[in-house]
Image: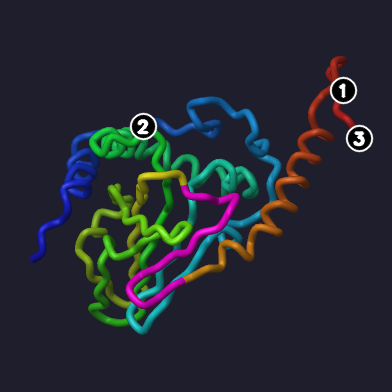
Amino acid sequence: MRRLPLSVTVALLALALTPPTPSSAQDGPRDGDAGLPPAGYGSLSQSDLALRLRNDEIEIRFVPLDQRVTRLLARDAYESLNSLVLSRRRQIDSVASTAGISRPGLALVTFFGLREAARYDPQTLTLVVRNRVFRPLGIVPFTPRFTSQQLEVRQQVSAVYLFEEEIPVTDGFSLAYNELTSEDWSRRRTTLDRERSRAAARARVQQPDSAGRVAR
């Protein structure tokens, strides 16, 4: 069996030794919320953020875990992804620290099996940003069998991927796995921009004024 990269080994060791961090619905970037969409006022679903790749053996689902877009999700969907990141916060920080990265790009990646004994290689998934290829610098498994690299029909495994730069969710990027590619993200910018404006408008309407009254 091929040995896993050191970054994955570090993540797995942290997963085994570190208990999950208690979740909170109000997690956000450590530098504050300035310039971010207001949390709790979005209406998108995870499918609106998910990029998909598919061949005869597997389907891959890629969801950026970036507050600039996850805050555009409906409340339940946002809190679900936010809690997932919080539950692996120590492992994520450990992998990023080992790699010397302070603000890694994060994504939730799920592999689905489409036939018996379907094979997949977690490290083959890459991002292409302005002709630069970014391979995962670390992987924090969310599903225990993630590193088995084999799936049965309808079986799925998930992990949080770390990249050396924040994913350019307000710009464009491509997703690649072997011969498969997706450039769908750039086509979603109109939807994301529109929802960002709508979320800000909802927040303004529902925030109380100086007298504690909510606008109608």
Residue 208 colored in magenta in the image: no
For marks 2 and 3, give the CA distance: 39 Å
Would you name the residue on which mark 3 appears? 216
Say the numbered circle drawn on residue 213.
1
| Marks 1 and 2, the one that precedes in the sequence | 2
Answer yes or no: is residue 19 visible: no
> In what element is the residue under mark 1?
loop
For marks 1 and 2, give the CA distance: 36 Å
Question: What residue type is disc 2 on?
Answer: Thr
User: Where is 97 relative to 42, above or below?
Assistant: above
Q: Would residue 195 be found to the left or right of residue 101 on screen?
A: right
Q: Please give the range of residues in magenta.
A: 167-181
- Rendered location of residue 88, percent (x, y): 35, 39
Who is closer to the viewer here, 50 or 26? 50
User: Where is 28 relative to 45, above or below?
Assistant: above
Answer yes or no: is residue 169 visible: yes
Would you name the residue on which mark 2 appears? 21
Question: What secondary structure is the stretch in magenta mostly built from?
Answer: loop
In the image, what residue occupies the spot 29% across and 48% down?
137
